[in-house]
């Protein structure tokens, strides 16, 4: 894979009051520091300096006091302790015995690389714009492989979105052509008029991954899974395009249709519960569930090549320099 994937950590991540967002940020700091580690006091200085230098995407008064800053950082480290416990050998970081310093491990395993990839995909704000589309596209491939493992081995699973044209997916061509192909596979009829689509509409009707469990006959009446992939903070807004109500505008909906959301983020609090359960309207497969599925069965290596290559770009030694420069000259400089 050619190109680069520059990482710039010049500001605190947006919505870092969410503990799972802040924990990601601490992991990034550990990865891209010269010593491959970051202490709780380092992070506290980062928060304090970020507030004072304007590198802060919320009301500075929110963290105006030292106590508020310490509470925020403690919450992040508490989430990291949960991650160490739940991800086990998939987790590529370690905490010191005093629980105050997070270190990035050397010699990553394939499971560690999957974790690092999902960490990168979850923090598009920190990577160069030229790299963001590649990260989200590869995450769709990862989601497809996760769905293959989740469903029985006779299930049919394919990419449906933009990445379908670069895979073995039968869903190619215009949007309406892909819908017609899908209708044939799952024995549905289109209820939308092809003339309603623009001639060169190459969209995906809000569908990234699709799977179904065939019976081998020619009638409807099986389980179909519509998957959308999300890397951003507004993941909940993407659920609407994989619901049965949404797809009833395209298909006759004679099958049992289930919506799924694949999210590169760990959408949990430090106790393991869903962070915002009231927002969940579909089957959510977050970072933890993807890791657990890959524990169950490893994908074909050919499907993982692009993931490994992207991790190599993301972990480039060149990405250490911007963080070191910021640490020494902006946030941690002495007045």
Image (cartoon, rainbow, N blue to C red):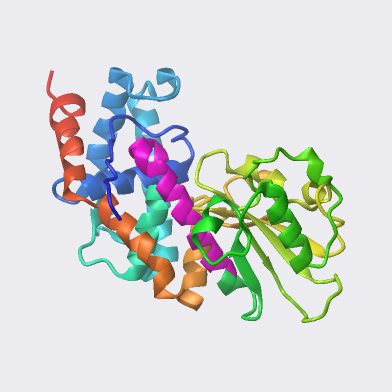
Query: Is residue 91 visible from the viewing direction of this image?
Result: no
Residue depicted at x 55% and y 57%: 164
In the rendering, at what x and y percent does residue 9 appear? 28, 35
Residue 197 versus residue 93 in the image, above or below: above
* Front-lying residue, 214 or 71: 214
Most common secondary structure along the magenta stretch: helix
Indicate the quadrant where residue 1 lies.
Answer: bottom left
Tell me how many marks there are.
0
Q: In the displayed structure, would residue 90 be above or below residue 237?
A: below
- Quarter occupied by the C terminus: top left
Q: Residue at x 74, y 65 (%)?
A: 224
**x%, y% of residue 219?**
86, 73
Residue 109 percent location from the top left of the image: 30, 70
Q: Residue at x 59, y 67 (%)?
A: 147
Q: Is residue 227 magenta?
A: no
Relative horizontal placement of residue 245, taking residue 123 as reference (left or right): right
Provide residue 305's location: percent of width, then percent of height.
36, 66
The magenta segment:
123-147
Residue in the foreground of this view, choosing between 126 and 176:
176
Using the rendered image of the protein, determine whether residue 169 is visible from the camera's viewpoint.
Answer: yes
Tell which of 236 and 97 is nearer to you: 236
**Is 174 displayed left or right of 106 in the figure?**
right
Residue drawn where x is 28% and y is 19% of the image: 53
Observer-nearest of 170 and 123: 170
Query: Residue 43: which quarter of the image?
Result: top left
Q: Is residue 132 above or below residue 93?
A: above
Q: Quadrant of residue 308?
A: bottom left
Q: Going by the image, does 76 lie left or right of 201?
A: left
């Amino acid at each position: 894979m050619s190109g680069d994937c520059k990482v710039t950590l010049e500001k605190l991540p947006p919505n870092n009051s969410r503990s799972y967002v802040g924990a990601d940020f601490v992991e990034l700091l550990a990865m891209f520091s010269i010593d491959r580690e970051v202490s709780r006091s380092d992070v506290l200085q980062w928060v304090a300096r970020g507030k004072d230098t304007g590198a802060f995407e919320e009301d500075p008064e929110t963290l105006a006091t030292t106590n508020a800053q310490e509470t925020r950082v403690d919450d992040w480290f508490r989430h990291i302790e949960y991650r160490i416990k739940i991800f086990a050998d998939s987790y590529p970081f370690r905490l010191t015995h005093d629980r105050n310093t997070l270190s990035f491990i050397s010699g990553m395993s394939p499971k560690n690389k999957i974790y690092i990839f999902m960490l990168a995909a979850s923090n598009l704000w920190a990577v160069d714009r030229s790299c963001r589309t590649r990260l989200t596209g590869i995450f769709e491939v990862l989601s497809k492989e996760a769905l293959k493992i989740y469903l029985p081995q006779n299930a049919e699973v394919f990419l449906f979105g933009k990445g379908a044209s670069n895979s073995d997916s039968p869903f190619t061509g215009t949007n309406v052509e892909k819908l017609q192909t899908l209708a044939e596979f799952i024995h549905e009829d289109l209820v939308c008029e092809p003339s309603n689509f623009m001639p060169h509409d190459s969209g995906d009707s809000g569908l990234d991954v699709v799977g179904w469990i065939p019976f081998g006959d020619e009638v409807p009446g099986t389980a179909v899974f519509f998957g959308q992939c999300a890397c951003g903070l507004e993941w909940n807004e993407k659920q609407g395009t994989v619901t049965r109500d949404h797809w009833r505008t395209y298909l006759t909906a004679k099958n049992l249709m289930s919506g799924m959301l694949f999210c590169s983020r760990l959408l949990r609090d430090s106790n393991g519960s869903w962070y915002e359960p009231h927002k969940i309207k579909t089957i959510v497969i977050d970072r933890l569930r993807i890791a657990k599925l890959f524990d169950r069965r490893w994908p074909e290596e050919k499907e993982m090549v692009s993931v490994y290559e992207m991790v190599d770009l993301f972990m480039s030694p060149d990405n250490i320099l911007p963080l070191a420069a910021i640490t020494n000259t902006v946030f941690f400089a002495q007045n």
